Amino acid sequence: MSAESGVKTFRDHDGLWEGHDVMQVASPQGFANDPELVFDFYNQRRRQLFEVEPNSAHYDLANLESNYNVSIITQNVDDLHERAGSTNILHLHGELLKVRSTHDDTNIKVWKTDLVLGDYCEKGHQLRPHIVWFGEDVPLISKAVEICASADVLFIIGTSMQVYPAAGLMHYIPEKTLVFYIDPNPALSGKENITVIAEPATIGVRQAITLLNALD
């Protein structure tokens, strides 16, 4: 979804994130072993956010709120949906522009500068990126299930359908739900209730909205 804005996708085809094994920079063990490496990795990602802008697909989804009740469930950790104007966003995997206490997952703060060792919460505990790492619970997954279970229409945009538990959300949608799957290399096949649009987000989202509006 955000790749066309210039945001680098976290995982490359070889399983590395910016040259790092994912377990080095996206696991509690990696953080315990080398917190400065982890901080540097996310500091670079955070800085990059200030150099990019939402793309047309972000704005198209935001504009849908004029005619539909829209909820966005995203695996992305950037703030481009917010900047485009969407108002109901669920960040499954956390947010780059937030940090939290290492001793209290509910103590979350907005953070727009570099995070380093010695940045503490008000109770004296080190802060960490507010990112869901491998091996950690996804606390918002139950809310995402509720949204999918009540959806009349579902857009699936730019995902390989390989990362769980997010990929499992498909199992909770009702049979009557109309699904548009938008991805240049789709991992699903079209069938009665699934329309596959083999395009990048900026093209595919607009095509899906055109198809959706034609049904009204």
Image: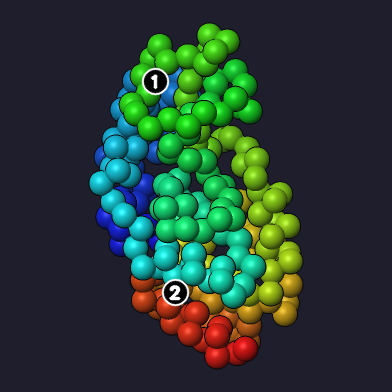
Q: On screen, 150 above or below 164?
A: below
Residue type at numbered disc 1: Pro
Q: Looking at the rendering, in which quadrant would you find the N terminus? A: bottom left
Q: CA distance from mark 1 to mark 2?
A: 38 Å
Among the 4 quarters of the image, the one containing residue 139: top right
User: Depth check: 120 or 42 in front?
Assistant: 120
Say whether marks 1 and 2 touch (CB < 8 Å). no
Furthest-top residue in this view: 124
Q: Residue at x 56, y 59 (%)?
A: 72
* Residue 103 image offset from top left, x and y in percent: 60, 18
Query: Mark 1 = which residue?
Result: 35
Among the 4 quarters of the image, the one containing residue 25: top left
Query: Mark 2 = which residue?
Result: 205
* Residue 27 image offset from top left, x and y in percent: 48, 31
Residue type at numbered disc 2: Val
Q: Residue at x 50, y 51 (%)?
A: 75
